[in-house]
Image: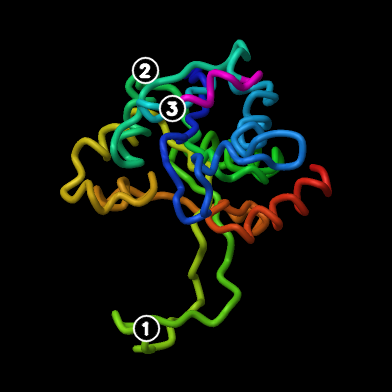
Amino acid sequence: MNRNLIAVIAAAGIGKRVGATIPKQYLPLLDKTIIEYSLRPFLNHPEISRVVVSLAKNDQWFAHLAVAKHPKIETVIGGAERVDSVLAALNVIDADDYILVHDAARPCIRTTDINKLIKQVKSNQQGAILASKVRDTMKRSDHHNEIITTVERDNLWHALTPQMFINKQLTDAINSATYPDKITDEASALEMCGLPVTIVEGRSDNLKVTREEDLQLATFYLSQGE
């Protein structure tokens, strides 16, 4: 089957933890905004035919970006939670198409990692995500921040984006999830349904801008080039 390859960018979040007065995806980073860097490898990718950006209902920034006029881009209105915003985008995409879901606040994604993910999913027709191995000692605490136990880090991964699926697989998993409030990323929806998802090891510099210090790291990584 000849499936189209479409990117979905989740950009409806507010991102208050970074301490800014505007959504973090619109913060300046070098000569662009964060979201423009997050979009760039998908817009430039020759195999990706469309890029669907899921925006907050009251978004007043995206339309003023030069990238908003790119011929590959279209927008949808997202929902209260990330999963709602992703689902709004999935609903305007054909069920049989491949979709790559990416966070608007991950500006350092490399084309090489995107290609590794695409190759994996096309080869076995099964969902896959980018992830990086946990290297530090991991602790689990109680509600008072006192350590309960050390978590074994073998086979433990940091989940990254993009995450890639056949649209129908992901849409059906989200719609049938027993606990939709527990869907923290796309892979977790398939996990709830007992469906397999493969990990593709990606670069650890594919960080999500969450705190102020992340902006400095992202600036450094982007200044090094692809």
Where residue 60 appears, as percent x and y from the top left, is: 47, 24
Local packing at callout 1 (Cα closer than 10 Å; few below 14, some 14-19, many 20+) is few
Q: Which residues are magenta?
A: 60-67
Q: Which label sits on residue 92?
A: 2
- Cα separation, mark 2 vs mark 1, equals 43 Å
Q: Secondary structure at mark 3?
A: loop
Residue tagged 1: 145
Quadrant into which the C terminus falls? top right
Residue occupying the point 35% across, 51% down? 184
Q: Is residue 216 left or right of residue 96?
A: right
Q: Amino acid at mark 3?
A: Asp
Residue at the far right: name it: 224
Depth check: 10 or 66 in front?
66
Residue tagged 3: 59
Mark 2 or mark 1: which is in front?
1
Nearer-N-terminus badge (2/1): 2
Residue occupying the point 39% across, 30% down? 56
Depth check: 214 or 51 in front?
214
Where residue 84 appears, as percent x and y from the top left, is: 30, 35
